[in-house]
Image (tube, coloured by chain):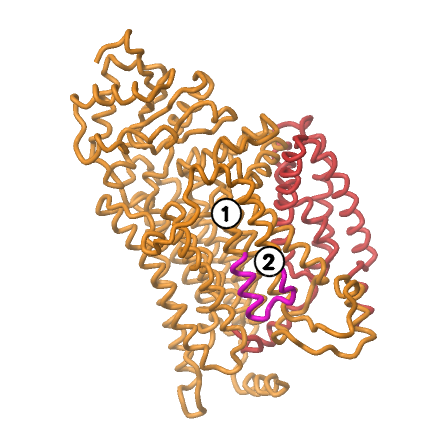
Amino acid sequence: VTAGGPGRRTGEALARPGSPPSIRVALYGAVAIVAALAPFALLLPPPLRVTVGFIFVLFGPGAAVTGWFPKLKPVAEVLIATVLSLVITTAAGEVMLTVRAWSPLGYAAVVAPVVVIMLVRHIISLALGRSRFGADQASQTQ
Amino acid sequence: VTAIPNLEALVAIGSPAPSKQRRSRAALGHAAALVAALLCWAASLRQVDLGRMSDLGLISVLPALYFVSLGVLCVGLWYALRAPTFRPSVVACYLLLLLLVLHGTVPVLYQEPHYAFVYKHFGVAAYIDAHGSVDRSVDIYQNWPGFFSALAILSHITGTSPLTWANWAQPFFSGLDLLAVCYVARGLTRDPRRIAWSATLFLLADWVGQNYLSPEAFGFLCSLTALGIVLNELGYRARARRQSHALTRFAFRGDRLLARWKRPARRTMEPPVAEASLPGWLAVSLVLLISAAVVVSHQLSPFFLIGGLTALVIGRRCRFRWLPVAVFVMTVAWVWLALPFLSIHFVLFSTDIGANSGGVTQVGSIDHQWVGSASRALSVFVWVFAVCAFTSQTRRRPREGIAIVALLALVPAAVILVQSYGGEAIYRVYLFSLPWCCCLIAGSLVDFPRRRAMDQPSAGYRRRVRAGLTLGLVATMAPLLLVAHFGYERANLMPANEVAVTTWFESHHRAGSILTFVVGNWPIKLGPNYNTYRGGGTYGGPILSQPQFQGRLLGPTDVPLVVEWLRGLGAPDVYVALGPAEEAYAEGFGLAPPGAVSHFQDLLLASPAFQLVHRDGDAALLELRQASSGSH
């Protein structure tokens, strides 16, 4: 496994920035809507509650964080977003256990607004065609 | 370096490029193959009768259509991987469908989660959700509650029990593992064909089955992701030793300033293989956060992670040399907190390497011996192939990266120097070395056989040899994987009525009761009050694990002995659960002759010393009568 093998040219194609903005906007929008519903999970009908719960816990926090890094490749973005979501949930659970303040819905109530705000900010950035680190790096190359 | 594209351009001019029509024909062929495989798989599942399963597991009841589907996918994937024009999307579709066929079959077919031991995880999550705290004296799970707390949060927010969706954790974790393998491979090579081969080999060699809803699956995924972040983000950026200030070095803006205003820094790392996507401080923070989650979730995974990080530091692929030390300190601190429980119930270090690397040795039926042989053959096949791949690649120039991949593949083996992990350490070693072995093999497959001189094998000859080798590889691994992966399913299948019996018991028992079994292959401890009764091995194990009842056919004369032993346990109430999964496990693993367990269960059921308190289909729950009220 070495750099610069026969796949060099095709490898350069992989070095493009992450997934297309339209897909990202759609995904962020979907996760933001789900995250907005998460604190009200108890009020939702069962099938919707299950869907909202899974999408929020498995993808919400991670998507909000990885949204800051548009240079991540799609594979890395999906992987890191999901793993980060699980890790943030684990960390939150561990903190709640340690301070003896167990409240899963409290977790949703605290994290969901942050996730929604961050995702909306990413959507606006993408819609305006710029993003923080992407813009930074673009200016760096000029 | 600049000559390479020119050379490729010349080659491209000399060889006929695939026409647009040919390309669309190939795309149509792939689409047809994918749809056909999906339909075959879906149709095959309707013909499965789980009741007819033999000791060869699921493969004994899967219809021919299933194998057709798998065959189409394997051949199609192989063809897509060797096509002159590499299409990542086509390969991704094949991998996704192969993942579904391999890991989605059980969730579709089974009513309840398979593996008896997964049910304890539901109990811990339910306990955490009900009590809002953990009790470190209860069991080892409550000393590493990280993953279970996340499970409890998920369960609470969705309003469902993990029982209803636990089987889907397997395709979920397998899919993420596949992405993680692609991610780490991306940190080693820019060749998408090699990355795709690494993922394919991983999918075809991962027979261990550690991707169920468990802290192990979470630990493996997080460890691999953390190592991927280090490989992709922290291993190659130039470092200015003298010029940089500590603050600016750890800040993204500082990195930019360095790049803009300082002179080009001296490279101290391996040559770059990819462009950084994250600022250094953020990548390090992510690795530390992920490592912390692994440390609080699983006992063994942090040590594999520390080994991997150390290997990356040694191989100059991680510029933050304190990273493994930081994870080690976190791990030691957490083990220190759990030490009171560990020192009483477990042996912390076992230096008997032979025993540590032996695995779980059970003789069992002929079919089970075949399954065991298949899993061993697949492991040896992968390891031997990886060694051959390493040897062949060390002769190449440039060869940077090979040594570090080999080191990463070797490091997990260090665990067997100090721990047997209940006989399972060797399986963990295989699992944690597998991604790196796959990267090694993939690295040598793509340009095998190597062209040494202009007059040596022609391109056509090399292509044919490579095609034969890769097809042989897939054709060998896929059947072995099927046998190894599905072979123990007769014992792993948990009937719904046995789960119902345990649920009933957990809502009716008195605190301090004992729930025992003939064999012990039973779904227990799935509710929030699982700590209020003793089950599993906490009272000395099930009936067949007692020395006085082993190695012989149990008959009517053994019932009084069993009753005497149960009364000697000193519990206020003793229950015995009876069901078909016990029989399947005992037969498969050679604990009793065929029919012996069900015969003995009938004897217990007929004994006046026991009272039938609950029945659900084939499963029954007996309560031992008090000594004064019952007779033998």
Q: Residue at x 42, y 58 (%)?
A: B204
Q: Is residue B216 magenta?
A: no
The span from disc 2 to disc 1 (Cα, nearest Å) is: 24 Å
Quadrant in which the N terminus of chain B is drawn: bottom right
Mark 2 secondary-structure assignment:
helix
Question: Which chain is home to disc 1?
Answer: B
Name the amino acid type tagged 1: Ala
- Pinpoint residue B383: horizontal percent, then vertical percent: 38, 64
Q: In the displayed structure, would residue B51 be above or below residue B328?
A: above
Check disc 2: other Cα within 10 Å, few if <14, some if 14-19, many if 20+.
few
Query: What residue is rendered at 77% in x and 70% in y?
Result: B244
Quadrant in which the C terminus of chain B is drawn: top left
Q: Is residue B63 visible?
A: no
**Dot 1 crowding, Cα within 10 Å, few <14, some 14–19, many 20+:** many
Give the magenta part as a residue range.
B306-324
* Residue B363 in the image, given as x and y percentages of width and height: 24, 46
Color used for chain B?
A: orange
- For the colour red, the matching chain is A
Q: Are marks 2 and 1 on the same chain?
A: yes
Question: Which numbered circle lies on residue B171?
Answer: none
Which of the two marks, 2 or 1, is nearer to us in this view? 2
Q: Residue at x 80, y 58 (%)?
A: A131
Q: Residue at x 38, y 25 (%)?
A: B497
B609 sits to left or right of B165: left
Asked if residue B596 lies left or right of residue B348, the reply is: left
Mark sitting on residue B217: 1
Q: Amino acid at mark 2?
A: Val
x, y percent for residue B568? 30, 20
Question: Considering the numbered disc 1 on the image, is that residue within a helix, a strand or a loop?
Answer: helix
Labelled disc at residue B325: 2
Q: As drawn, which residue projects farthest toward the top?
A: B629
From the viewer's perspective, is residue A50 above or below residue B220? above
